[in-house]
Amino acid sequence: MNKEDAVIKYFQYKQIQTLNYLKYGYFKRIMSYVLDNYNDYFIRKLFLRLVEKGWFYRKQNEKKSYLYKFNPIQHEPIKIKEIIDPKRFIISWD
């Protein structure tokens, strides 16, 4: 089991989603405990990877910082639309 799976399984087991929106600091402490790794840089990168994969909802509060809520059922992250080559739309009048 890799580190991401360990964190996700722990969050699902403890039902962290019932705590509603929390600051990153709360998730950092829990992740550090689960992984027994207190390296802030590593924990932050892991957390951002989980947010990117759709395991967390993100909400901006009044102070321009973010609050996060764990999503026990992973949803698809927002995908950037495919860039279409403009050459496909050239009309030839020959």
Image: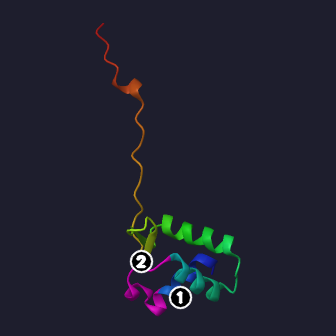
Verify whether residue 18 appears in magenta.
Answer: yes
Measuring from the top left, give residue 25's x and y in whole percent. Answer: 55, 79
Instruction: Name the residue tied to disc 1.
Output: 10
Q: Tag 2, which secondary structure?
A: strand
In the figure, 93 relative to 29: above or below? above
Instruction: Name the residue tied to disc 2.
Output: 69
Q: How many numbered discs sit on the rendered protein?
A: 2
Relative depth, front residue between 45 and 54: 45
Q: Amino acid at mark 2?
A: Lys
Quadrant containing the C terminus in the rendered view: top left
Is residue 6 among the parts visible in the rendering?
no
Seen at 67% across and 72% down, the residue is 42
Measuring from the top left, give residue 35's x and y in whole percent. Answer: 66, 84
Colour scheme used in the picture? rainbow
Q: CA distance from mark 2 to mark 1?
A: 15 Å
Callout 2: 10 Å neighbours few (<14), some, many (20+)? many
Q: Amino acid at mark 1?
A: Tyr
Measuring from the top left, give residue 49's x and y in whole percent. Answer: 56, 67
Seen at 43% across and 90% down, the residue is 15
Seen at 44% across and 74% down, the residue is 68
Seen at 38% across and 88% down, the residue is 18
- Sequence-wise, the earlier of marks 2 and 1 is 1
Q: Which residues are magenta?
A: 12-23
**30 left or right of 59 in image:** right
Measuring from the top left, give residue 61's x and y in whole percent. Answer: 39, 69
